[in-house]
Image: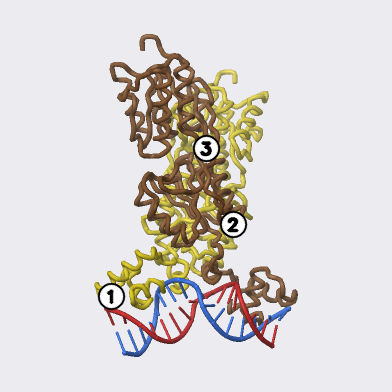
Chain colours: A yellow, B brown, C red, D blue
Amino acid sequence: MKDVARLAGVSTMTVSRVVNGEAGVGPETAARVERAIRGLGYQRDAVARQLRRKGQLTQTIGLLVDNVADPFMAAFASAAEDVARQRGNVVLIGSSRDDLRREREVIAAFTSRRVDGMILIPVEGSHRFLLPSMATGTHVVCADRRAPGLDVDTVIVDNRDAVREAVGHLVAHGHRRIAFLGDRKEIWTLAERRTGYTEALAEAGIPLDPGLVRHGLRVASDAAAAVTGLLAAPDPPTAVLAGNDIVAVGVLETLPPAVAMIAFGDFVLADRISPPVTVVSQDPVAIGTTAAHLLFARIHGDTSPPRTVTLPTRLITRGSGELPARVGA
Amino acid sequence: MKDVARLAGVSTMTVSRVVNGEAGVGPETAARVERAIRGLGYQRDAVARQLRRKGQLTQTIGLLVDNVADPFMAAFASAAEDVARQRGNVVLIGSSRDDLRREREVIAAFTSRRVDGMILIPVEGSHRFLLPSMATGTHVVCADRRAPGLDVDTVIVDNRDAVREAVGHLVAHGHRRIAFLGDRKEIWTLAERRTGYTEALAEAGIPLDPGLVRHGLRVASDAAAAVTGLLAAPDPPTAVLAGNDIVAVGVLETLPPAVAMIAFGDFVLADRISPPVTVVSQDPVAIGTTAAHLLFARIHGDTSPPRTVTLPTRLITRGSGELPARVGA
DNA sequence: CTGAAAGCGCTAACAT
DNA sequence: ATGTTAGCGCTTTCAG
């Protein structure tokens, strides 16, 4: 900046004004400064700028997901990034890999870089460690899952209700032995889905068989193995509810076409499998967009009480969820 | 920091030493400082820290992809982020959406935040605008695609050869009317794949029919429409080469099972479609990991001449690419 | 319309 | 083992 000022024969203050497009600079001077900037390839240092303008925004937000490679998270992140970019912000991204320690590391890296706010898909566990940062003005929005003990804007879907409907749908097609396969039951969404499953069975007067519930399936192959185990049992399920997209893919590896199935979360090619897969679809783009809008509202001064936005889900019937319970099964 | 110093009854310098775990602080004093830090919830300001330690690293890298929601890019980004995190770095992410102007905006946002380096999946067009930043020490690595006119480390696969092999595979199964469907032909990877297609036909002595080549298919539905168009023609193709994963999904929407197909890029459930889809698989995780390693080597002083790492691809035969050319088609 | 001085939070370099 | 001084690159504040 000093170099630019020298080359243009002005003070650094004038350069600063030009760079920031502030009024009060003679057009002649401004042009000379512009030329010097281009000549030297000068670019404002956002780091130094930020330091002086205390209380101002870094125009940087943090985005914490479980794993960017997951299609749901990827679509979610993409949508949030879109909104951020439209607002001239840049996004720091990090993955928790469902590990609280790692999540804390990532969040510490965010706050030490003075992000204006962050969107979290929180892992299980207390998030009270965020309170000091929040007290100093870092805004937090949760998406997809609630963070226990954190009273912040949250964007979710009604997982419980959606699963209750899905299981009810299977019951309506004659199923009574319905398996539930999910990722770690500590994950908020999965706990909710599991509850919906339990409630639906209770409503239908079907006793819960713990042998039909498998948790902790973190990769597709876990789910495939679980299916194999279930089917080898003396009284196998006639229908399966896959708790998320990853489990769904694993289930599809081994599930015989005659066994009914509904997956939580839509996925690419679900309609090209045989039979086409009935799913509970949720909209990751809407979740990401909504969360980002909520965050920016907070960043720009919204101080209303935290609210929860519940986005709709939709049961998309494609065939796999409408298979009848096999006679004798 | 001043507050911490006051509370602990020491100078800010001592606080700085404790925060940075530097030697030369009495254990007694250190403990007092630690207590003050916790009491006040103090966290070092990475922004201010960075300013003074000029020439030091921000421990932040930029990652520019075409679109995070694309499974290939998501897996790539996830792998790169993993490496960065292991090294205590944080990742700024941005999407170009295949738009040079937007790419430049994102890159400017990166450099103004003084990233130590960045990994780019570059869009088409000159990237000479990066030269000034590179001259001032911002390291750049390209992945997946080359950036014309930019002499930097690059991680790619041999798209041309891979497609030549794939088309040869179709020819070996009797196909002579092979369609090529791709995204915008300005994208480097697609140009390469297209060249491989042309070369393979030439090797087989098959004249190139421009009517069998469709470009500019950006979303799945574009590809689906293109397939419909091709099949309605008087002399339709007996085999289709899908230029990327997105096109592949679109093709699968409408392609009759009897038409052979090979897709560039593996995708989830490719083996569950009927017939299972033969693909040219590349490894996005390896690409992301390699690119990140190259970048960190540069950041930590590697000044050897830029090199290109070419990662292997693999033709995975699953059925759709081994269908015979229908007699009379 | 333009500039000089001060200082943001931190740390390198040099005392003590 | 601890403190003092100065300054990173920029912008706020106040004076011309």
User: Which residue is disc 1 drawn over?
Assistant: A25
Rendered location of residue B230, percent (x, y): 32, 23
Q: Residues within 10 Å of mark 1 (few under 14, many from 20)?
A: some
- The number of numbered discs placed on residues in the rendered structure image is 3
Residue B283 seen by the camera: yes
Q: Secondary structure at mark 2?
A: loop
Give the label on residue B216, or none: none
The image quadrant where one finds the N terminus of chain A is: bottom left
> What is the three-letter code of the residue carrying label 1?
Val
Rendered location of residue A41, percent (x, y): 39, 63
User: Which residue is disc 3 drawn over?
Assistant: A245
Q: CA distance from mark 2 to mark 1?
A: 42 Å
> What is the three-letter code of the residue carrying label 2?
His
Q: Residues within 10 Å of mark 3 (few under 14, many from 20)?
A: many
Q: Residues within 10 Å of mark 2 (few under 14, many from 20)?
A: few
The image quadrant where one finds the C terminus of chain A is: top right
